[in-house]
Amino acid sequence: MLLLLSAGLALGLTRNPNQYFRIVREVGKEWKKIERDSLNRAVRSLYESKLVSIKDNRDGTLTLVLSKAGKRMALTYDIENIEIKIQTHWDDKWRIVMFDVPEKFKRTRDAIRIHFKNMGFYEFQKSVFVHPYPCAKEIEYIMEFYKARRFVRFMVATEIDNALELKRHFKLS
């Protein structure tokens, strides 16, 4: 969803007609794939996350506009090099990501697993990963990028039974 909004931004900034039509073609293909209910949930979620703002138009329609935070997020993350910022002080909380991606989306599942490993997550189980530092925005970005929101769950925990092993792995005191 955020990428579709970014495409609108790209259209506004491009001066090359070939680039303009390429963006329109690609966005059109993606737009047809979106379920209306999913779109409404995504828009509501984006609005609540303050990544977009809503502008009332004179004709009674609404326009979604990327907020400054939304533009920054859309342009900040590079899916190939996404990483979690290491904090100077650990807040004693574990970030746990679980996913259950169906077999028919095996490539998506494998790509998500590789991203979590590359981001420094500890593989707790085959589809459960743990990290000690805040990473909700990065997880959100990955879920949106792979259109896998319905398969991924994220939680923050204060206790975990193998905390000593995790602390050793992440070199926490």
Image (cartoon, rainbow, N blue to C red):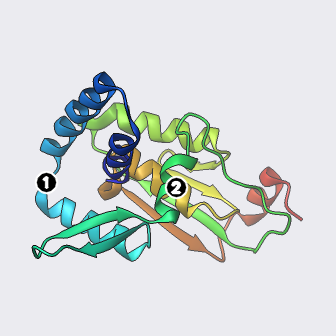
- Give me the residue at 12% from left, 43% from top: 32
From mark 2 to mark 1, how far is it between C-alphas? Answer: 24 Å
Residue 22 percent across, percent down from the top left: 27, 27
* Mark 2 crowdedness (10 Å alpha carbons): few <14, some 14-19, many ≥20: some
Badge nearest the viewer, 2 or 1: 2
Residue type at the position of mark 1? Glu
- Give me the residue at 65% from left, 65% from top: 134
Element at badge 2? Answer: helix
Element at badge 1? Answer: loop
Residue 35's tag is: 1
Q: Give the camera-side residue of 37 and 67.
A: 67
Residue 92's tag is: none
161 sits to left or right of 111: right
> In the image, is residue 104 above or below residue 51?
above
> In the image, is residue 35 above or below residue 161?
above
Q: Quadrant of the C terminus?
A: bottom right
Residue 73's tag is: 2
Residue 86 percent across, percent down from the top left: 77, 56
Residue 3 percent across, percent down from the top left: 36, 47
Residue type at the position of mark 2? Met
- Give me the residue at 14% from left, 63% from top: 37
Residue 130 percent across, percent down from the top left: 61, 57
| Location of residue 38 by image quarter | bottom left
The earlier-in-sequence mark between 2 and 1 is: 1
| Location of residue 167 by image quarter | bottom right
For the image, the number of numbered tags is 2
